[in-house]
Image (cartoon, rainbow, N blue to C red):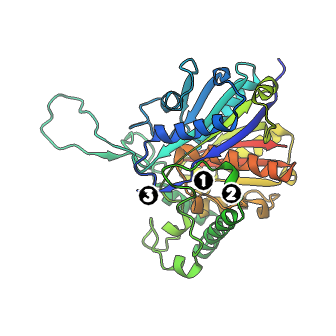
Amino acid sequence: MNRRDVYIVDAVRTPVGKYNGSLASVRPDDLAARVLRELLARTPHLDPSRIDDVYVGNANGAGEENRNVARMAALLAGLPVAVPGVTVNRLCASGLEAVIQAARAIALGDASIALAGGVESMTRAPYVLPKSDRPFPAGHTELYSTTLGWRMVNPRMDPRWTVPLGESAELIADKHHITREQQDTFALSSHQKAAAAWKNGLFDAEIAPVAALDRDECVRPEASLAAMATLKPSFRTENGTVTPGNASPLNDGAAALLLVDEEGLKATGREPLARISASGVWATDPHYFGLAPVEAVNRALTKAGRTFGDLTTLELNEAFAAQVLGCVAEWPEFDPSILNPQGGAIALGHPLGASGARLAGTVAHQLARKGSGTGVATLCIGVGQGLALVLER
Protein backbone atom coordinates (compact mmCIF):
# COMPACT_ATOMS: atom_id res chain seq x y z
CA MET A 1 0.00 0.00 0.00
CA ASN A 2 1.33 3.43 -0.96
CA ARG A 3 1.24 5.93 1.88
CA ARG A 4 -0.38 9.22 1.04
CA ASP A 5 1.32 12.52 1.70
CA VAL A 6 -0.25 14.39 4.63
CA TYR A 7 -0.30 18.19 4.66
CA ILE A 8 -0.96 20.77 7.35
CA VAL A 9 -3.18 23.41 5.75
CA ASP A 10 -3.51 25.62 8.81
CA ALA A 11 -2.80 25.66 12.54
CA VAL A 12 -4.44 27.85 15.15
CA ARG A 13 -4.42 28.18 18.91
CA THR A 14 -5.91 30.25 21.64
CA PRO A 15 -3.61 32.49 23.62
CA VAL A 16 -2.44 30.55 26.66
CA GLY A 17 -4.12 31.69 29.85
CA LYS A 18 -2.46 31.60 33.23
CA TYR A 19 -3.89 29.52 36.07
CA ASN A 20 -7.03 31.23 37.34
CA GLY A 21 -6.45 33.91 34.73
CA SER A 22 -8.40 35.30 31.79
CA LEU A 23 -9.59 31.88 30.58
CA ALA A 24 -10.68 30.65 34.01
CA SER A 25 -14.36 31.08 33.14
CA VAL A 26 -14.11 29.20 29.83
CA ARG A 27 -14.91 25.49 29.78
CA PRO A 28 -12.42 23.17 28.06
CA ASP A 29 -15.01 21.99 25.52
CA ASP A 30 -15.64 25.62 24.59
CA LEU A 31 -11.89 26.26 24.25
CA ALA A 32 -11.59 23.32 21.86
CA ALA A 33 -14.67 24.40 19.93
CA ARG A 34 -13.16 27.88 19.51
CA VAL A 35 -10.12 26.64 17.60
CA LEU A 36 -12.16 24.22 15.48
CA ARG A 37 -14.48 27.06 14.43
CA GLU A 38 -11.47 29.22 13.62
CA LEU A 39 -10.04 26.59 11.27
CA LEU A 40 -13.36 26.41 9.42
CA ALA A 41 -13.68 30.20 9.26
CA ARG A 42 -10.22 30.44 7.69
CA THR A 43 -11.11 27.78 5.11
CA PRO A 44 -14.46 28.90 3.67
CA HIS A 45 -14.16 26.72 0.56
CA LEU A 46 -14.15 23.56 2.66
CA ASP A 47 -17.50 21.82 3.06
CA PRO A 48 -17.47 20.74 6.75
CA SER A 49 -19.28 17.54 5.83
CA ARG A 50 -16.07 16.46 4.05
CA ILE A 51 -14.27 16.22 7.41
CA ASP A 52 -13.74 12.54 8.17
CA ASP A 53 -12.89 12.79 11.88
CA VAL A 54 -11.92 15.12 14.70
CA TYR A 55 -9.04 14.11 16.98
CA VAL A 56 -8.50 16.03 20.23
CA GLY A 57 -5.85 15.36 22.87
CA ASN A 58 -6.69 15.90 26.53
CA ALA A 59 -4.72 14.88 29.60
CA ASN A 60 -7.47 15.12 32.19
CA GLY A 61 -10.95 14.17 31.03
CA ALA A 62 -12.27 14.00 34.57
CA GLY A 63 -14.52 17.05 34.43
CA GLU A 64 -16.21 19.31 31.90
CA GLU A 65 -14.47 17.51 29.03
CA ASN A 66 -17.31 15.00 29.55
CA ARG A 67 -15.07 12.04 28.69
CA ASN A 68 -14.95 12.63 24.91
CA VAL A 69 -14.14 16.31 24.51
CA ALA A 70 -13.47 15.86 20.77
CA ARG A 71 -17.07 14.96 20.07
CA MET A 72 -18.37 17.64 22.42
CA ALA A 73 -16.20 20.32 20.79
CA ALA A 74 -17.19 19.23 17.26
CA LEU A 75 -20.86 19.63 18.14
CA LEU A 76 -20.29 22.96 19.93
CA ALA A 77 -18.29 24.22 16.94
CA GLY A 78 -21.27 23.61 14.68
CA LEU A 79 -19.81 20.79 12.63
CA PRO A 80 -22.38 18.49 11.00
CA VAL A 81 -23.61 15.83 13.43
CA ALA A 82 -22.27 13.18 11.05
CA VAL A 83 -18.67 14.29 11.70
CA PRO A 84 -17.30 12.00 14.44
CA GLY A 85 -14.76 12.82 17.13
CA VAL A 86 -12.29 10.88 19.27
CA THR A 87 -10.31 11.97 22.31
CA VAL A 88 -6.78 10.64 22.85
CA ASN A 89 -4.58 10.77 25.94
CA ARG A 90 -0.82 10.58 26.05
CA LEU A 91 -0.65 13.02 28.97
CA CYS A 92 1.50 16.06 28.08
CA ALA A 93 1.83 14.95 24.45
CA SER A 94 -1.89 14.29 23.93
CA GLY A 95 -2.24 17.12 21.40
CA LEU A 96 0.69 15.85 19.35
CA GLU A 97 -0.62 12.29 19.63
CA ALA A 98 -3.92 13.51 18.17
CA VAL A 99 -2.07 15.06 15.22
CA ILE A 100 -0.08 11.87 14.66
CA GLN A 101 -3.16 9.65 14.80
CA ALA A 102 -5.02 11.88 12.36
CA ALA A 103 -2.02 11.96 10.02
CA ARG A 104 -1.72 8.18 10.20
CA ALA A 105 -5.37 7.73 9.21
CA ILE A 106 -4.89 10.03 6.23
CA ALA A 107 -1.61 8.41 5.19
CA LEU A 108 -3.26 4.98 5.17
CA GLY A 109 -6.29 6.15 3.21
CA ASP A 110 -8.78 5.86 6.07
CA ALA A 111 -9.43 9.60 5.88
CA SER A 112 -8.87 12.50 3.51
CA ILE A 113 -9.55 15.48 5.77
CA ALA A 114 -9.24 15.64 9.56
CA LEU A 115 -9.08 18.18 12.33
CA ALA A 116 -6.59 17.44 15.11
CA GLY A 117 -5.55 19.29 18.22
CA GLY A 118 -5.64 19.42 21.98
CA VAL A 119 -7.16 21.24 24.93
CA GLU A 120 -6.64 21.66 28.65
CA SER A 121 -8.13 23.82 31.36
CA MET A 122 -5.95 23.24 34.39
CA THR A 123 -7.85 25.97 36.21
CA ARG A 124 -11.15 24.12 35.87
CA ALA A 125 -9.75 20.63 36.53
CA PRO A 126 -12.06 19.09 39.15
CA TYR A 127 -11.41 17.41 42.45
CA VAL A 128 -12.27 13.71 42.52
CA LEU A 129 -13.49 11.59 45.40
CA PRO A 130 -12.76 7.85 45.11
CA LYS A 131 -15.56 5.46 45.82
CA SER A 132 -15.17 3.12 48.79
CA ASP A 133 -14.91 -0.59 48.11
CA ARG A 134 -17.59 -1.17 50.74
CA PRO A 135 -20.88 0.65 51.32
CA PHE A 136 -21.35 3.38 53.94
CA PRO A 137 -17.77 3.63 55.27
CA ALA A 138 -17.51 5.19 58.73
CA GLY A 139 -14.10 6.84 58.30
CA HIS A 140 -12.79 9.83 56.37
CA THR A 141 -11.75 9.76 52.72
CA GLU A 142 -9.36 11.83 50.61
CA LEU A 143 -10.22 14.34 47.89
CA TYR A 144 -7.73 14.45 44.98
CA SER A 145 -6.95 17.40 42.72
CA THR A 146 -6.78 16.45 39.03
CA THR A 147 -4.85 19.57 38.00
CA LEU A 148 -1.43 17.93 37.66
CA GLY A 149 0.65 14.93 38.63
CA TRP A 150 0.11 11.60 40.28
CA ARG A 151 -3.15 10.70 42.01
CA MET A 152 -4.60 7.48 43.46
CA VAL A 153 -1.29 5.74 42.83
CA ASN A 154 -1.23 1.95 42.76
CA PRO A 155 0.70 0.86 45.89
CA ARG A 156 2.49 -1.80 43.82
CA MET A 157 4.15 0.91 41.69
CA ASP A 158 7.90 1.29 42.23
CA PRO A 159 8.24 4.39 44.47
CA ARG A 160 11.19 5.61 42.38
CA TRP A 161 8.76 6.07 39.50
CA THR A 162 6.19 8.14 41.35
CA VAL A 163 8.34 11.04 42.52
CA PRO A 164 6.97 14.53 41.76
CA LEU A 165 7.66 15.80 38.25
CA GLY A 166 9.92 18.53 39.65
CA GLU A 167 12.00 16.01 41.55
CA SER A 168 12.52 14.19 38.27
CA ALA A 169 13.85 17.46 36.85
CA GLU A 170 16.22 17.64 39.82
CA LEU A 171 17.43 14.12 39.02
CA ILE A 172 18.16 15.20 35.44
CA ALA A 173 20.05 18.23 36.75
CA ASP A 174 22.09 15.88 38.96
CA LYS A 175 22.80 13.52 36.08
CA HIS A 176 24.02 16.22 33.70
CA HIS A 177 25.49 18.60 36.30
CA ILE A 178 23.07 21.37 35.32
CA THR A 179 23.30 24.30 37.72
CA ARG A 180 20.58 26.61 39.01
CA GLU A 181 22.21 29.46 37.11
CA GLN A 182 22.10 27.54 33.82
CA GLN A 183 18.42 26.79 34.33
CA ASP A 184 17.59 30.39 35.20
CA THR A 185 19.54 31.64 32.19
CA PHE A 186 17.64 29.31 29.91
CA ALA A 187 14.32 30.38 31.43
CA LEU A 188 15.17 34.04 30.97
CA SER A 189 15.99 33.37 27.32
CA SER A 190 12.59 31.72 26.87
CA HIS A 191 10.81 34.84 28.12
CA GLN A 192 13.00 37.14 26.03
CA LYS A 193 12.43 35.13 22.84
CA ALA A 194 8.69 34.88 23.46
CA ALA A 195 8.39 38.61 24.12
CA ALA A 196 10.34 39.37 20.93
CA ALA A 197 8.20 36.95 18.91
CA TRP A 198 5.04 38.68 20.09
CA LYS A 199 6.51 42.12 19.38
CA ASN A 200 7.51 41.06 15.87
CA GLY A 201 4.12 39.50 15.05
CA LEU A 202 5.41 35.94 14.75
CA PHE A 203 2.42 34.49 16.61
CA ASP A 204 -0.22 36.55 14.79
CA ALA A 205 -0.98 33.90 12.16
CA GLU A 206 -1.78 31.21 14.71
CA ILE A 207 -3.78 33.08 17.34
CA ALA A 208 -7.56 32.82 17.79
CA PRO A 209 -8.50 35.28 20.57
CA VAL A 210 -10.95 34.06 23.18
CA ALA A 211 -12.66 35.68 26.18
CA ALA A 212 -11.03 39.04 25.39
CA LEU A 213 -7.57 37.42 25.65
CA ASP A 214 -5.45 38.01 22.56
CA ARG A 215 -1.93 37.15 23.74
CA ASP A 216 -0.20 34.64 25.98
CA GLU A 217 -0.64 35.58 29.60
CA CYS A 218 2.54 34.25 31.22
CA VAL A 219 5.23 35.91 29.10
CA ARG A 220 7.27 38.27 31.28
CA PRO A 221 9.26 40.77 29.16
CA GLU A 222 10.61 42.28 32.39
CA ALA A 223 12.07 38.97 33.63
CA SER A 224 15.63 39.13 34.95
CA LEU A 225 18.22 36.80 36.41
CA ALA A 226 18.25 38.87 39.57
CA ALA A 227 14.52 38.34 40.09
CA MET A 228 14.75 34.63 39.29
CA ALA A 229 17.59 34.22 41.80
CA THR A 230 15.24 35.26 44.62
CA LEU A 231 12.86 32.33 44.03
CA LYS A 232 13.10 29.38 46.40
CA PRO A 233 13.47 25.81 45.11
CA SER A 234 10.14 24.03 44.87
CA PHE A 235 11.06 20.39 45.40
CA ARG A 236 14.32 20.17 47.38
CA THR A 237 14.85 22.33 50.43
CA GLU A 238 18.61 21.72 50.36
CA ASN A 239 20.59 22.33 47.19
CA GLY A 240 17.46 22.44 45.05
CA THR A 241 17.69 24.00 41.58
CA VAL A 242 14.14 23.77 40.19
CA THR A 243 12.03 26.84 40.95
CA PRO A 244 8.81 28.42 39.69
CA GLY A 245 10.99 30.61 37.51
CA ASN A 246 12.67 27.82 35.54
CA ALA A 247 9.66 25.51 35.23
CA SER A 248 6.51 25.79 33.11
CA PRO A 249 3.41 27.20 34.82
CA LEU A 250 -0.13 25.79 35.04
CA ASN A 251 -2.26 26.95 32.12
CA ASP A 252 -5.43 26.87 30.05
CA GLY A 253 -5.63 26.75 26.25
CA ALA A 254 -6.41 24.89 23.04
CA ALA A 255 -4.86 24.35 19.61
CA ALA A 256 -5.94 22.67 16.38
CA LEU A 257 -4.64 21.83 12.90
CA LEU A 258 -6.31 21.05 9.59
CA LEU A 259 -4.76 17.94 7.99
CA VAL A 260 -5.43 16.71 4.45
CA ASP A 261 -4.22 14.49 1.64
CA GLU A 262 -3.88 15.67 -1.98
CA GLU A 263 -7.62 15.42 -2.68
CA GLY A 264 -8.44 17.11 0.59
CA LEU A 265 -6.02 19.91 -0.24
CA LYS A 266 -7.97 20.66 -3.42
CA ALA A 267 -11.17 20.83 -1.38
CA THR A 268 -9.69 23.52 0.87
CA GLY A 269 -8.62 25.82 -1.95
CA ARG A 270 -5.50 26.66 0.05
CA GLU A 271 -1.76 26.11 0.01
CA PRO A 272 -0.30 23.96 2.81
CA LEU A 273 2.00 25.23 5.52
CA ALA A 274 4.02 22.02 5.74
CA ARG A 275 4.03 18.28 5.14
CA ILE A 276 4.15 15.66 7.88
CA SER A 277 7.17 13.44 7.33
CA ALA A 278 7.57 11.01 10.25
CA SER A 279 7.00 10.48 13.95
CA GLY A 280 8.79 8.68 16.76
CA VAL A 281 7.87 7.53 20.24
CA TRP A 282 10.03 6.20 23.07
CA ALA A 283 9.75 5.23 26.72
CA THR A 284 12.27 5.26 29.54
CA ASP A 285 12.48 5.07 33.34
CA PRO A 286 9.53 7.13 34.66
CA HIS A 287 11.72 9.14 37.03
CA TYR A 288 13.78 10.30 34.04
CA PHE A 289 10.73 11.07 31.89
CA GLY A 290 12.21 14.40 30.80
CA LEU A 291 14.93 12.68 28.76
CA ALA A 292 12.57 10.50 26.69
CA PRO A 293 12.41 13.01 23.79
CA VAL A 294 16.08 12.24 23.06
CA GLU A 295 15.39 8.85 21.52
CA ALA A 296 11.93 9.81 20.24
CA VAL A 297 13.52 12.53 18.09
CA ASN A 298 16.35 10.22 17.03
CA ARG A 299 13.82 7.65 15.83
CA ALA A 300 11.64 10.21 14.06
CA LEU A 301 14.62 11.67 12.19
CA THR A 302 15.76 8.20 11.13
CA LYS A 303 12.30 7.40 9.75
CA ALA A 304 12.29 10.70 7.88
CA GLY A 305 15.76 10.06 6.46
CA ARG A 306 17.04 13.23 8.12
CA THR A 307 19.76 14.20 10.57
CA PHE A 308 20.15 17.02 13.06
CA GLY A 309 22.16 18.83 10.41
CA ASP A 310 19.05 19.03 8.22
CA LEU A 311 16.96 20.82 10.84
CA THR A 312 16.02 24.48 10.58
CA THR A 313 13.98 24.51 13.80
CA LEU A 314 13.25 22.25 16.76
CA GLU A 315 10.46 22.94 19.25
CA LEU A 316 11.02 21.00 22.48
CA ASN A 317 8.39 21.56 25.14
CA GLU A 318 9.87 23.32 28.16
CA ALA A 319 8.33 21.44 31.05
CA PHE A 320 11.47 22.33 33.04
CA ALA A 321 14.67 24.09 32.03
CA ALA A 322 16.65 21.16 33.45
CA GLN A 323 14.76 18.72 31.27
CA VAL A 324 15.43 20.70 28.09
CA LEU A 325 19.10 21.19 28.91
CA GLY A 326 19.40 17.48 29.70
CA CYS A 327 18.02 16.54 26.28
CA VAL A 328 20.33 18.98 24.51
CA ALA A 329 23.28 17.46 26.37
CA GLU A 330 22.40 14.06 24.88
CA TRP A 331 22.19 15.38 21.29
CA PRO A 332 25.86 16.17 20.53
CA GLU A 333 25.11 16.88 16.85
CA PHE A 334 22.27 19.32 17.59
CA ASP A 335 22.71 23.07 17.12
CA PRO A 336 20.93 24.68 20.11
CA SER A 337 20.65 28.01 18.28
CA ILE A 338 17.58 26.65 16.44
CA LEU A 339 15.87 25.50 19.65
CA ASN A 340 12.53 27.14 20.48
CA PRO A 341 13.25 30.34 18.51
CA GLN A 342 9.99 31.95 19.68
CA GLY A 343 10.34 30.92 23.31
CA GLY A 344 8.83 27.89 24.94
CA ALA A 345 6.49 26.66 27.64
CA ILE A 346 8.39 28.31 30.50
CA ALA A 347 7.26 31.63 29.04
CA LEU A 348 4.30 30.73 26.84
CA GLY A 349 2.72 28.19 29.19
CA HIS A 350 1.92 24.49 29.15
CA PRO A 351 -1.80 23.61 28.99
CA LEU A 352 -1.08 19.89 29.06
CA GLY A 353 -3.31 18.39 26.36
CA ALA A 354 -2.92 21.38 24.05
CA SER A 355 0.86 21.82 24.08
CA GLY A 356 1.75 19.17 21.51
CA ALA A 357 -0.66 20.62 18.96
CA ARG A 358 0.66 24.10 19.71
CA LEU A 359 4.23 22.95 19.04
CA ALA A 360 3.29 21.25 15.76
CA GLY A 361 1.42 24.34 14.62
CA THR A 362 4.24 26.67 15.55
CA VAL A 363 6.75 24.56 13.60
CA ALA A 364 4.42 24.52 10.58
CA HIS A 365 4.10 28.32 10.62
CA GLN A 366 7.86 28.72 11.03
CA LEU A 367 8.52 26.53 7.98
CA ALA A 368 5.91 28.41 5.95
CA ARG A 369 7.58 31.75 6.76
CA LYS A 370 11.00 30.38 5.82
CA GLY A 371 9.64 28.87 2.60
CA SER A 372 11.53 25.61 3.08
CA GLY A 373 13.17 23.49 5.74
CA THR A 374 12.74 20.66 8.21
CA GLY A 375 11.41 21.03 11.72
CA VAL A 376 10.67 18.87 14.74
CA ALA A 377 8.04 19.17 17.46
CA THR A 378 8.66 17.06 20.56
CA LEU A 379 7.62 16.69 24.19
CA CYS A 380 8.51 14.73 27.29
CA ILE A 381 5.63 12.93 28.96
CA GLY A 382 5.10 12.08 32.61
CA VAL A 383 5.63 8.40 33.52
CA GLY A 384 8.55 8.16 31.13
CA GLN A 385 7.63 8.73 27.48
CA GLY A 386 8.67 11.01 24.64
CA LEU A 387 6.95 11.82 21.34
CA ALA A 388 8.28 13.59 18.25
CA LEU A 389 6.97 14.71 14.86
CA VAL A 390 9.03 15.74 11.80
CA LEU A 391 7.60 18.37 9.43
CA GLU A 392 9.02 19.48 6.09
CA ARG A 393 8.43 22.11 3.46
- In the figure, is residue 372 to the left or right of 69? right
- The one nearer the camera, 32 or 79, is 79
CA separation in Å, label 3 and label 1: 27 Å
Residue where numbered disc 1 is placed: 290
Q: Secondary structure at mark 2?
A: helix
Q: Position of residue 152 (x, y in %)?
A: 36, 41
Q: Position of residue 43 (x, y in %)?
A: 70, 34
Looking at the image, which residue sits at the far bottom? Answer: 226
Label of residue 21 in the image: 3
Q: Looking at the figure, which quarter contains the C terminus?
A: top right
Which of marks 2 and 1 precedes in the sequence?
1
- The one nearer the camera, 365 or 183, is 365
Crowding near the residue tagged with mark 3, few <14, some 14–19, many ≥20 C-alpha atoms within 10 Å: some
Residue where numbered disc 2 is placed: 327
Residue flagged by tag 2: what amino acid is it? Cys
Disc nearest the viewer among 2 and 3: 3
* Residue at 45% in and 56% down: 22
Label of residue 215 in the image: none
Q: Position of residue 77 (x, y in %)?
A: 53, 32
Is there a contact, CB below 8 Å, between mark 1 and mark 2? yes
Residue flagged by tag 3: what amino acid is it? Gly
- The one nearer the camera, 134 or 58, is 58
Q: Position of residue 250 (x, y in %)?
A: 47, 56
Looking at the image, which residue sits at the far front? Answer: 44
Q: Secondary structure at mark 1?
A: helix
- In the figure, is residue 148 to the left or right of 181? left
* Residue at 82% in and 41% down: 302
* Residue at 61% in and 39% down: 38
Q: Looking at the figure, which quarter contains the N terminus?
A: top right
CA separation in Å, label 1 and label 2: 8 Å
Residue flagged by tag 1: what amino acid is it? Gly
